[in-house]
């Protein structure tokens, strides 16, 4: 009878220790997971800024190369939306996440890019904008709005210098192949 009580006590202790271990793991995950997600969001924002800088450099190259110049960029969007706004001659990258990249409500400038963070609840909406005052940005040779959202495959964007328009602005056409 005493032997059975010891076996029962061992099982109870094992279950209690296992529950304590699971509770400790749960507590660590409760604090660590949001921080990990915030760090991932920060990395995505920084990568998106680099992508916008690469696109801007490509546009500068094709303008310097003259009319008829073309470049291909393979663009992978894992988070966010890239908007090609032909009406306002601008490119806009919108992201949503937990990381506060800049002070909410205050626009900051990084090179030619304007970055604006808007906080809504626990989420932050980050807009990375590049406006082209001296160029006429088009999508498929039309002043229209095109949104490229996250996709499992990469987009092949073709940037073309289509010469000058009536206002003496260089026409930069963006297409997808």
Image (tube, helix red, strand yellow):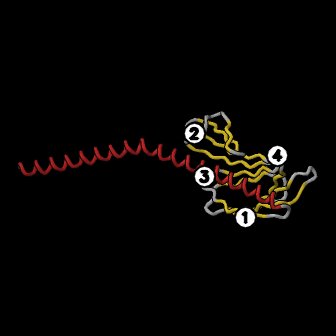
Q: Mark 3: few, some, or many residues within 10 Å (few <14, many ≥20)?
A: few
Q: Mark 4: few, some, or many residues within 10 Å (few <14, many ≥20)?
A: few
Compare residues 125 and 64 and report the one nearer the observer. Answer: 64
Query: Which residue is tagged 2?
Result: 100
Give the SS element for disc 2: loop
Q: Quadrant of residue 141?
A: bottom right
For marks 3 and 2, give the CA distance: 15 Å
Q: Earlier in the sequence, mark 1 or mark 4?
A: 1
For marks 1 and 3, give the CA distance: 19 Å
Give the SS element for disc 3: helix
Q: Earlier in the sequence, mark 3 or mark 2?
A: 3
Query: Which residue is tagged 1?
Result: 72
Q: Earlier in the sequence, mark 2 or mark 4?
A: 2
Is 126 on the left or on the right of 85, as rendered?
Answer: left
Query: Which residue is tagged 4?
Result: 133
Quadrant in which the C terminus is drawn? bottom right
Query: Which residue is tagged 3?
Result: 47
Horizontal and vertical percent position of residue 7: 13, 51
Foreground tag (2 vs 4): 4
Residue pictured at 73% horizontal, 47% vertical = 130
Q: Quadrant of residue 171?
A: bottom right
Horizontal and vertical percent position of residue 53: 68, 52
Using the image, determine if residue 24 lies above or below residue 75: above
Using the image, determine if residue 170 lies above or below residue 133: below
For marks 1 and 2, give the CA distance: 32 Å
């Amino acid at each position: 009878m005493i032997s059975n009580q010891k076996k029962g006590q061992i099982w109870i202790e094992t279950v209690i220790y296992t529950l304590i271990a699971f509770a400790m793991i749960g507590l660590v995950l409760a604090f660590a997971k949001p921080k990990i997600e915030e760090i991932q969001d920060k990395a995505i924002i920084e990568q998106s800024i680099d992508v916008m800088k690469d696109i801007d450099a490509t546009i500068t190259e094709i303008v310097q190369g003259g009319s008829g110049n073309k470049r291909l960029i393979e663009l992978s969007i894992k988070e966010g939306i890239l908007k090609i706004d032909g009406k306002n001659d601008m490119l806009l990258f919108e992201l949503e996440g937990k990381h506060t990249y800049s002070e909410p409500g205050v626009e900051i400038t990084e090179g030619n890019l304007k970055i604006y963070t808007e906080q809504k609840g626990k989420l932050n909406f980050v807009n990375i904008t590049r406006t082209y005052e001296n160029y006429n940005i088009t999508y498929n040779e039309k002043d229209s709005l095109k949104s490229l959202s996250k996709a499992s495959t990469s987009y092949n964007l073709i940037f073309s210098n289509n010469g000058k328009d009536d206002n003496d602005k260089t026409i930069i056409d963006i297409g997808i192949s």
